[in-house]
């Protein structure tokens, strides 16, 4: 049934949409280099005017995600910036700033933030999210350590050690 659903979906898509679907699946399945090549083929090929305007923005965003997975943050930032210029979606701006933060030094990043109040607001939001994630990771580490100690104590008290 799942295969039939995919085939039905592909049957009604344009060729360029099928190319993106293939690239998306490559990325989802960990074939990052192949996905990058597929996305680049879409972007450097003949533009299809029949797809919606934001289609190419999403291709740029996914290419940015692929570069990010390879820790190529400068390239990722360029792709996310292009994606944001086309789609104007907050998620793409956030990804752009995260990629910039990852490859720029502190002074360069501060200059970038001063270009726009929206950049500054988004950076504040991004910083809060990073802190929350870091905090939850720290809690998990404490829980792991505590569970390890409990297991050690139990093994000592039962004479296993």
Image (spheres, rainbow, N blue to C red):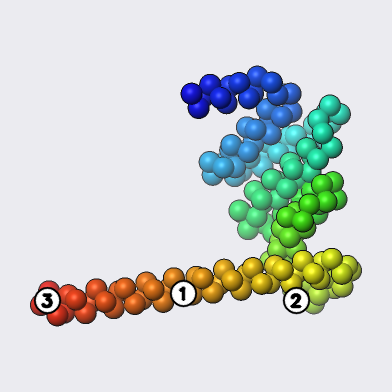
Where residue 2 appears, as percent x and y from the top left, is 50, 27
Residue 23 in sight: yes
Q: Earlier in the sequence, mark 3 or mark 1?
A: 1
Of residues 63 and 7, the one nearer the viewer is: 7
Q: Say few, some or many: other residues with alpha carbon within 10 Å of mark 2 (under 14 / 14 to 19 / 20 or more).
A: few
Residue topped by disc 1 = 139
Q: Residue furthest left?
A: 159
Where residue 158 appears, as percent x and y from the top left, is 11, 76
Where residue 130 appears, as percent x and y from the top left, is 63, 69
Residue 102 vertical placement versus 7 (above, below): below
Q: Say few, some or many: other residues with alpha carbon within 10 Å of mark 3 (under 14 / 14 to 19 / 20 or more).
A: few
Q: Is mark 1 in CB contact (under 8 Å) with mark 2?
A: no
Of residues 107 and 113, the one nearer the viewer is: 113
Of residues 78 and 8, the one nearer the viewer is: 8
> What residue appears at the point 75 percent right and 54 percent down from the top-left corner?
92
Which of the 4 quarters of the picture holds residue 107? Answer: bottom right
Residue topped by disc 2 = 106
Where residue 85 appears, as percent x and y from the top left, is 85, 50
Q: CA distance from mark 1 to mark 2?
A: 28 Å
Residue topped by disc 3 = 158
Residue 149 vertical placement versus 79 (above, below): below
Please tell me whether mark 2 sits on a helix, a strand or a loop.
Answer: helix
The image shows a total of numbered marks equal to 3
Please tell me whether mark 3 sits on a helix, a strand or a loop.
Answer: loop
Residue 146 vertical placement versus 32 (above, below): below
> What residue appears at the point 41 percent right and 76 percent down from the top-left corner?
142
Q: CA distance from mark 3 to mark 1?
A: 28 Å
Q: CA distance from mark 3 to mark 2?
A: 54 Å
Which of the 4 quarters of the picture holds residue 106? Answer: bottom right
């Amino acid at each position: 049934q799942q295969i039939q659903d995919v085939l039905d979906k592909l049957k009604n898509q344009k060729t360029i949409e099928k190319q993106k679907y293939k690239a998306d699946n490559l990325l989802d399945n960990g074939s990052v280099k192949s996905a990058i090549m597929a996305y680049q083929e879409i972007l450097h090929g003949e533009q299809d005017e029949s797809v919606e305007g934001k289609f190419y923005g999403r291709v740029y965003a996914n290419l940015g995600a692929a570069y990010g997975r390879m820790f190529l943050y400068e390239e990722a930032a360029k792709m996310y910036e292009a994606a944001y210029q086309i789609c104007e979606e907050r998620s793409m701006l956030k990804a752009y700033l995260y990629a910039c933060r990852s490859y720029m030094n502190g002074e360069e990043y501060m200059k970038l933030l001063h270009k726009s109040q929206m950049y500054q607001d988004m950076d504040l939001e991004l910083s809060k999210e990073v802190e929350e994630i870091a905090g939850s990771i720290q809690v998990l580490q404490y829980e792991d350590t505590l569970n390890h100690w409990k297991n050690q104590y139990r093994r000592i008290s039962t004479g296993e050690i």
